[in-house]
Image: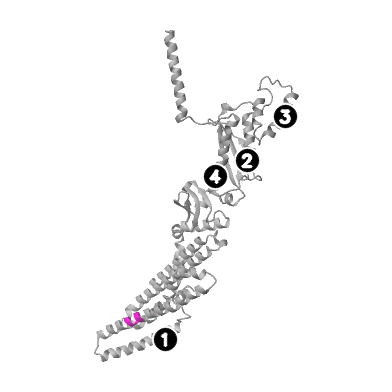
Amino acid sequence: MLHRLLTLLKYFCCTLFNRTIMDETQELGNQIGNWLGNILQEMGVAGSSLRFVKMLVLLALTIIIALLIDFIVRKILVNFLHHFANKSKTNFDDHLIERNITRYISQWLPAIFVSAVIPVVFHDFDFLITPLTEIVDIYLFIVIALFIQALLQGSRDYLLTKDKFKDKPIQSLAQLLNIASWIVVAILIFSELTEKSVTNLFAALGAASAVLLLIFKDTILGFVGSIQLSYNDMVRVGDWIVMSKYGADGNVTVINLNTVKVLNWDNTITNVPTYALISDSFINYRNMEEGPGRRIQKAIYIKQSTVRFLEKNDLDKLKGIQLINKYIDTRQADIDSHNEKNNIDKSLAINGRNQTNLGIFRKYLLEYLRQNPIMRKDMKLMARQLHPTEHGIPIEIYGFSKIKSWVDYEYVMGEIFDHAIASVKYFDLELFEIPAGSDITPLKLQHNGDVKTGNEAQESKS
């Protein structure tokens, strides 16, 4: 069966140039050879020179006819295919033309013609017939492999223009089929050169399967990985992924057999092994971009020493803030009722329940977020207090923005925190900041003054 496949590949154009035509070509070539020999003898060429000159003339004629066939096929076939591609409604054939598939098709007939006339041209030099025929057959195999490669690349380009195939591992599949075609061609060429059965070669390859698995380990793992990525819909071209292990943080541009190409935000490119996306963890932001909202989660730090209980005059002042005036009244009424019911001594503010400037500030931030048209009200939305740290008390804003595009999202988030930072002083709170620059100057002056006062006191004692 494989031997028949070899014959089929050698004469791929059998419908146009079948075996009968090749036999007729050889018969005609023999007649031409005899006729040419007679002419050369009449011209005075004899002996060993006759065979050599006859071979050179036939070789020249063969080259001229092969070039003529190539020219005619190119003109007729290529022009026809280009015309057909321009008239057709689909752009599949356009992608095939771009991959120069017509060039490989036009090379079949000249190669088959040369293979047919080699026994005629080198009739008197029969030791050259077999190696030259093998060379032409090898050339034909390579042309067929290049044709398959162009066909796969054109098909891949066409499928990637379709939305339903953009997230499929088309690139990986095309690469795998291309590798398989070259492996088959290499086996056929080896069989042609060694004159051994293709079946025996495959049996030998089976014995060497362990070595082959080692050689093609990355390719096999990559193909399996690309299939799993596609089947489980783990990553698509265009997804924003983060894979810290490989320094990848950006959009996926290519998914092929061995690597996934990621265009990072600094315009550098990271190549991640395809199988690594199966064996290692990574972050995919696709759901964030396709979902109803993009999360905002960020904190400001309040200086702990500025947190205090609020007196009545403080509450009256804060009632001027429209977003929380009703809340202050309702909350204070509830607190007063609780304190009266439990006979709380309010001569000290620490007794009983009280409102604090930090608590009202948190409520203000929440109401500000609720009235902001950019924030999604149907998703989690809060202003919460986190565990205190050496940098102060974190007040975190947690919510989801309707705007998801990066630039606009950053602008909206900046507006929210600009307002939050500017609002802090209205609640007699301070943001925590590590002293630097101009903040240190007053501390130095105070320190120098304290040192000077201490020295003067020491002198007065003495």
Work out whether residue 159 or residue 59 is closer to the camera in this orientation and state it.
Answer: 159
Q: Quadrant of residue 447?
A: top left
Q: Which residue is mark 4?
A: 411
Image label count? 4
- Mark sitting earlier along the chain (2/4): 2
**Is residue 357 depicted above or below 155 in this figure?**
above
Marks 1 and 4 sit apart, C-alpha to C-alpha, by 80 Å
Q: CA distance from mark 1 to mark 2?
A: 89 Å
Question: Can residue 159 be seen at all in this image of the molecule?
Answer: yes
Q: Earlier in the sequence, mark 1 or mark 3?
A: 1
Q: Which residue is mark 3?
A: 333
Where residue 385 appears, as percent x and y from the top left, is 60, 34
Quarter of the image for residue 57 reads bottom left
Left or right of 323, for residue 166: left
Residue on which the image places disc 2: 369
N-term-proximal mark, 1 vs 2: 1
